[in-house]
Image (cartoon, helix red, strand yellow):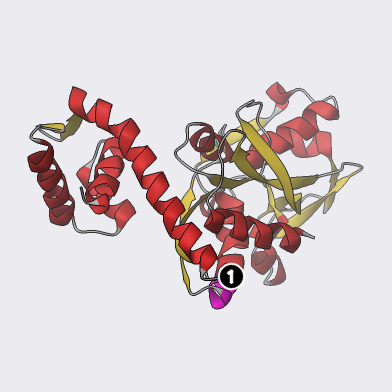
Amino acid sequence: MDIHHLRVFASVFKHRSFSKASEELHLSQPTVSDHIKALEEELNCRLFDRLSRKIIPTKEAGVLIGRAGEIIEKVEGIQGLLGEFRNELSGHLNIGASTIPATYILPGLTASYRKQNPGVFFEIIVSDSRGIIDKVAGHDLLVGVVGAKLDNGQVHYSPFLDDELIAIAAPSFTKNRSLGLGEIAALPMVMREQGSGTRREFEKILVKEGIDLQQLSIVGLFGSTDAIKQAVKEGMGISIISRRAVRDELECNILREIKIKNADMKRQFFIVTHRKRTLPHIYKAFLEYLLPSAG
């Protein structure tokens, strides 16, 4: 049985989509279809029912998916073991990350890591913090980097890098450059979605300062940091964002920082792993590289 067939099958099963599987695996959609067809012929059963635009796994697929995951993990473990024996690292690393780490932290770290280990291929899966934590808890990812801790007994959090949340406004913002947290909360505000680590940490700060979340004047919700920045530039409202995400805009005076009086807006990023999963050698080596980088 071809391990590539199983990888393609697992991706189609996860996404319920041939096109999304092709994007994830960097294969053409006809190639994905050929892999599935070959696996179905080998197993002499149908794995997916194609109903118009919907892909529905069959009962046989439901039985296969558990074993397929075990086989893929064991093969990757063998590859890592042999690489360890040869004192070299090679293979595919799937790392989940929330928006800020994925955009402003991991690109530099992964690039420098690959200079030392050119046989390693990275794929960064981007979602909000809740989405990444859920994927680690559900065994869809082995490692994630997130901007907030959520209550989930299945995962372990390792402190990674420090961060600072700041208030930003358009250059035309006419109020004082320094405001109290209560004054900030009363201004028209654009925010990330509920699962965002940035939003969660800001809301925790408000609650700690005794500010009712219902007092927030939220005028728009956006699913990405870039969309937030653009909305603020256009004068839609102010926002709370990671300083890492707006360094260039602040230096070029494209955005303004509003200083917040008497409020600690520090937070931390975390590396999240499953409590009951043993990481393959290639993942352990990368985490050993990341955690000293945090210092």
Quarter of the view holding residue 200: top right
Picture coordinates of residue 267 (x, y %)? Answer: 77, 45
Q: In this view, does 110 lie above or below 135?
A: below
Identity of the residue drawn at 67% across and 58% down: 288
Residue 216 as seen in the image, left or right of residue 142: right
Pick the front one: 52 or 216? 52
Residue 41 as seen in the image, left or right of residue 151: left
Q: In this view, does 4 lie above or below 274?
A: below
* Residues drawn in magenta: 111-116
Amino acid residing under circle 1: Tyr
Identity of the residue drawn at 38% across and 39% down: 70
Identity of the residue drawn at 80% across and 60% down: 295
Identity of the residue drawn at 65% across and 68% down: 248
Picture coordinates of residue 286 (x, y %)? Answer: 60, 60
Q: In this view, does 134 lie above or below 175?
A: above
Pick the front one: 74 or 155? 74
- Is 114 magenta? The answer is yes
Pick the front one: 126 or 288? 288
Name of the residue lying farthest toward the bottom: 115
Residue 51 as seen in the image, left or right of residue 291: left
Observer able to see residue 232: no
Mark 1 — residue?
113
- Is 126 magenta? The answer is no
